[in-house]
Image (cartoon, rainbow, N blue to C red):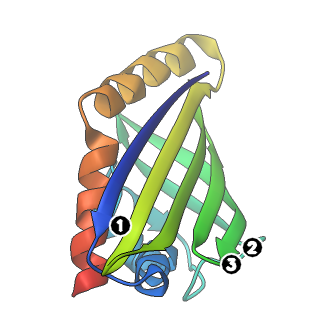
Amino acid sequence: MRTWTANRHVAAAPQAVLDAICDPESCRRWSPVPFDLDGAAEARLLPGSRVRVSGQLIGRRVGFEVEVHEAGDGRLALSAHGPVALDVAYEARPAGDGSEVRASVSVRSGGGLFGRLAEQATAALLQAGALGHAVDRIARTAAA
């Protein structure tokens, strides 16, 4: 399992950051990987929430089961299982005139040949800075 992190100062309060990362529609705008919600989602991600999402990965439509483990007190932690397994955490803490946001994504293969290829493709996206760009989009969403 490999882990990527990104840290940014955001000109918004931690609660505004949490609101941006816990709103399923907002997530679609800042996510490092474009996805569609499959079916209805709650208005806000809450601990215990489960949603199914899908998107394109290396030219193939794939689905993920997402489970929210934590969503409050400036933190969102979730796991997503599909051809790639992801452990994701976002944390916003007060800092000066806004928040310090820390994001981390751990990636491992979901199994099989396609899982290994999907893991490598996901790792390449993260290595190229996709997580940092996602945090930048969170900053713009939270500050709006």
Other-residue count near label 3 (Cα within 10 Å), few / some / many at <14 / 14–19 / ≥20? some
Earlier residue among tags 1 and 3: 1
Q: Which mark is residue 50?
A: none
Q: Residue at x 64, y 59 (%)?
A: 77
Figure quadrant of residue 127: top left
Figure quadrant of residue 125: top left
Q: Is residue 3 above or below residue 140?
A: above
Distance of label 2 from label 3 (alpha carbons): 4 Å
Q: Which mark is residue 46?
A: 3
Is residue 32 toward the left or the right of residue 110 in the image?
Answer: left
Is residue 38 toward the left or the right of residue 7 in the image?
Answer: right
The residue at which mark 2 appears reads as: 47
Query: What kind of residue is marked 3?
Result: Leu
- Disc 2 and disc 3 in contact, CB within 8 angstroms: yes
Can residue 59 be spotted in the picture?
A: no
Query: What kind of residue is marked 2?
Result: Pro
Image quarter in which the N terminus is found? top right
Q: Secondary structure at mark 3?
A: loop
Other-residue count near label 2 (Cα within 10 Å), few / some / many at <14 / 14–19 / ≥20? some
